[in-house]
Structure formats: structure tokens, C-alpha cells
Image (cartoon, rainbow, N blue to C red):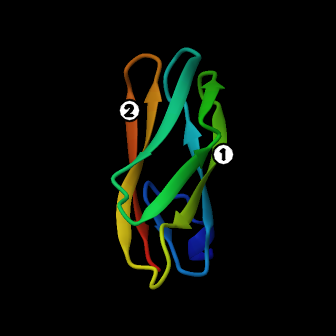
Amino acid sequence: MRAGRLNTPSLLIRDDQSTAARTITNVGHRALYFSSSASGFSRHVVDVRPAAVRLGPGESARFTVRVEHRGAGVHPLDDGWVTWRGGNGSEARIPVLISR
């Protein structure tokens, strides 16, 4: 399996990529709304789409992380995380490394 297609609990976005996709799954026993956020990045603008999803028990949704470099010049390394928060207070944090 190609590394770019592996669904792991972390993300590496290489210099030839501007997006990466992963899947979130509701492992609970009732339907929940989940909202996403991106944090910790200092040299890139990171956007998660969709920003929110509603998932029934066992349902999954694919999400995309998009990266834009801030400013001109060299595209340095950067890291942060994507967080998915459930309506019940649950939280899933996905570390992200941007290798530019």
C-alpha cells in the first residue's frame, strides 16, 4: 500500500502535496456531531473540511486537511494537530507534520 493512502492516526504532508485525506469514525453507541479545528501551526495556514459532521454509531466520514504556506520564500517544516471534538465531550487529536 502506498504511504499516502495509509489511514494512520497521524499525517505527514510532503512538499509535493497541498492536501491529505483521512477518515473519522464514531465508535460510540449514539449519533453525535463532531467539529474540527487545526492548531499549533506557525508557518502554514491549515484548513479542515468538512468543519463538522454528524455520525451515527459506527459511521465514518472522510475529511481533508489543506495546507497553504504563509509568506514567500522557503517552505520550512511545521507541525501542529487536527482535533475532532464530539458533542459528548470526546476528543480525537491527530498530529500533523508538514515537510516542505
Q: Does dot 1 land on a helix, a strand or a loop?
A: strand
Image point 43% across, 58% down: which residue? Answer: 10
Q: Is residue 48 above or below residue 12?
A: above
Q: Is residue 68 above or below residue 77?
A: above
> Which residue, as the protein is rendered here, is positioned at the far front?
72
Question: How far across and how far down the image is residue 98, in percent?
Answer: 44, 70
- Residue 85 horizontal side relative to residue 53, left or right: left
Query: Mark 1 sits on what residue?
Result: 62
Question: How far across and how far down the image is residue 8, in percent?
Answer: 48, 58
Q: Amino acid at mark 2?
A: Glu
Q: Does dot 2 land on a helix, a strand or a loop?
A: strand
> What distance separates the C-alpha of mark 2 from that of mark 1?
17 Å
Query: Mark 2 sits on what residue?
Result: 91
Q: Amino acid at mark 1?
A: Arg
> Which residue, as the protein is rendered here, is positioned at the far bottom?
74
Image point 47% across, 40% down: which residue? Answer: 37
Which of the pair 93/31 is nearer the observer? 93
Q: Is residue 99 above or below residue 12?
A: below
Question: How far across and how far down the image is residue 48, in percent?
Answer: 57, 47
Instruction: Identify the mark at residue 46; answer none if there is no mark.
Output: none
Tell me the quarter of the picture where residue 91 sits: top left
Which of the pair 52/73 is nearer the observer? 73
Tell me the quarter of the picture where residue 1 sits: bottom right
- Residue 51 horizontal side relative to residue 37, left or right: right
Question: How far across and how far down the image is residue 32, in percent?
Answer: 55, 19
Circle 1 Cα neighbour tier, 10 Å, few/some/many (<14 / 14–19 / ≥20) = few
